[in-house]
Image: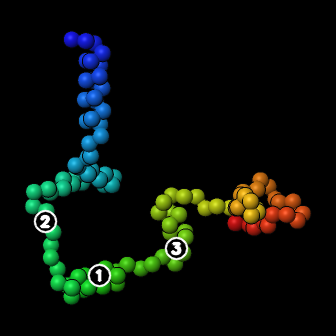
Amino acid sequence: MDPRLLVVAVLFLALSTACSTTRVVRLDMGQGQPIIHLPRTDDARPVELEEEEFTHAIVQEARQWRPPVNPEKAARELFEVPPRSGWYGYTQRQGVFPVEGQPPLRSGPRWMRA
């Protein structure tokens, strides 16, 4: 057997199995044994609801959910994005761009503090 063909076959097998999705969810919350969830695949079928049942379920969910007081801060915390701060300039050509230090006191780009 040609060694190059063997290498290609081994690489193909290694790469094809690495792309499969995980069927098990393991949740370790640091409180004893982790929770392991195996999704059911054999008996999962769509459920038909009357419009009234669907509306009732959505209303119940909406009543339990409270919007955050500061949506921008909540989104930053959810996506783990640090808050922006500093000076930013704006020109029609460049758009918005960050400025190192404090902006100079001259005309030209518009400056804004974030």
- The amino acid beneath tag 3 is Pro
Query: Which label's residue is closer to the chain start, 3 or 1?
Result: 1
Residue 34 shows in this picture = no
Tell me the number on the disc at residue 109.
none
The residue under label 2 is 45
Image quarter where the C terminus lies is bottom right
Image quarter where the N terminus lies is top left
Q: Please give the name of the residue rendered at 88% of the width and 65% of the height, measured from the top-left corner.
A: 107
Crowding around mark 2 (Cα neighbors within 10 Å: few <14, some 14 to 19, many 20+) is: few
The picture quadrant where one finds residue 60 is bottom left
- Which residue extends farthest left? 43
Distance from disc 3 to disc 1, alpha carbons, whole Å, reads 22 Å
Element type where label 1 sits in the image: helix
Query: Which label's residue is closer to the chain start, 2 or 3?
Result: 2
Q: Is residue 36 left or right of residue 90?
A: left
Crowding around mark 1 (Cα neighbors within 10 Å: few <14, some 14 to 19, many 20+) is: few
x and y percentages locating residue 65 in the rendered image:
37, 78
- The amino acid beneath tag 2 is Arg
Distance from disc 2 to disc 3, alpha carbons, whole Å, reads 36 Å
x and y percentages locating residue 45 in the rendered image:
13, 65
The residue under label 3 is 71
Tell me the number on the disc at residue 58.
1
- The amino acid beneath tag 1 is Ile
Residue 9 shows in this picture = yes
x and y percentages locating residue 84 in the rendered image:
64, 61
Which residue is nearer to you in this view: 33 or 21? 21
Q: Please give the name of the residue rendered at 25% of the width and 23% of the height, measured from the top-left corner.
A: 9
Mark 2 and mark 3 in contact? Answer it, CB < 8 Å. no
Element type where label 2 sits in the image: loop
